[in-house]
Amino acid sequence: MPSALERRLTAHVDRLADEHPPLRIEDVDFTVHDPVAFDGRYGHVLDYMARVELEVDRNVLELTTMLPHPPEIDRYFYADVWQPQEIQHGRILDRLQVELGRAPAVADTDSVSAKLRLLGALAHLPAFQDVCRMLYYLTGMSTERSAVLAYNLLHNGTAAMGERAVAETIIGPIKRQEPGHFVFYQLSARGLWDQLARWQRWLVRRMRSVSFGPVGANTDEQRADFGEVMLTLGISEDAAFAAQAVRVERELLWAQDQGMDVPPYVLRAFRHAVELARARVAERDA
């Protein structure tokens, strides 16, 4: 018989599927009144977000590698609900930047790192797979929470420029689908954390500390891209942004460390991205 948590998660994912079907390109108004100004301000933001959303196919490959025997509710969520929603976000954002005259996003949709393949080999042991699942939920939470915050800022900025079609038919509908993903990860993380043994919790903390990175930033070039997005959206110096992105993670993993608002590895990763972006901008302007 399914547990109470499994029933709750299933009901939640059913609601996501029913109430938030994948967005349709036919419903989007790509009208931009001042393409030059909009591209100059937000073009690189669109490119980064489009690439990250389009790489969802690779993310699914990574999940099937890292979690060889996932709970059925996880597979239902990421394969039947999350992936179809996210891929449409990417296609719409990419179409918008092409409409602005930019090149399409270059997305990596099929590579899986050797590190993840090793994790997948170890994850055939159920106790280790639970560690990998916890890392998946933590990554999902920080990614989706960061996305919600970033899309809110992008929506406000787009509306302030007078680009109502983009704000109301692209950014607004996309940002309304992200919180439901965060809720799935949060419920799953809280439920699994309570089941982990002490050694598993220690390993999760250790692996998270050394593996955390901004979403979609796997190289220094991509980290600099992410840093430029932060600079544009005005969150480069805002520790409160990082705190909101990992609030539940701090609560679960680091509750014993009183006074820690943001895990140090999160601040290091965000600040490093901004430093790389500023260095690149300075080099470009020299």
Image (tube, rainbow, N blue to C red):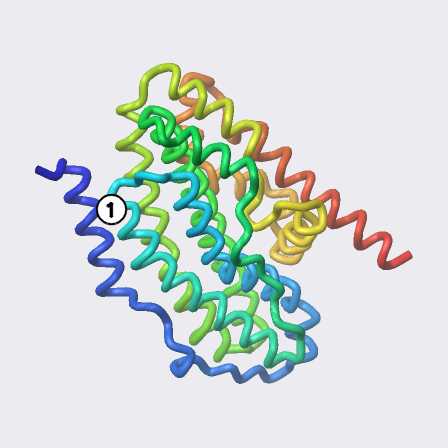
Quick one: which residue is furthest to the left in this view? 1
Q: Quadrant of residue 154?
A: bottom right
Q: Nearer the viewer, residue 36 or 20?
A: 20
Residue at disc 1, secondary structure:
helix
Q: Nearer the viewer, residue 182 or 199?
A: 199
Residue 162 lies, with reference to residue 267, above or below; the image says below
Q: Is residue 81 left or right of residue 63?
A: left
Q: Position of residue 275 (x, y in %)?
A: 74, 43
Tag 1: Cα neighbours inside 10 Å, few (<14), some, or many (≥20)? some
Q: Which residue is mark 1?
A: 73
The residue under the point 58% across, 61% down is: 107
Residue 41 lies, with reference to residue 163, above or below; the image says above
**Type of residue at label 1?**
Ile
Residue 233 lies, with reference to residue 46, above or below; the image says above
The residue under the point 64% across, 33% down is: 268
Q: Quadrant of residue 83?
A: bottom left
The residue under the point 35% across, 26% down is: 125
Q: Position of residue 138 (x, y in %)?
A: 42, 37
Quadrant placement of the C terminus: bottom right
Q: Is residue 179 left or right of residue 224?
A: left
Q: Position of residue 209 (x, y in %)?
A: 54, 27
Quadrant placement of the N terminus: top left
Q: Is residue 36 left or right of residue 148?
A: right
The residue under the point 53% across, 46% down is: 112
Q: Nearer the viewer, residue 154 or 53?
A: 53
Q: Quadrant of residue 34?
A: bottom right
Q: Position of residue 42 (x, y in %)?
A: 63, 67
> Looking at the image, how many numbered discs can be counted on the residues?
1
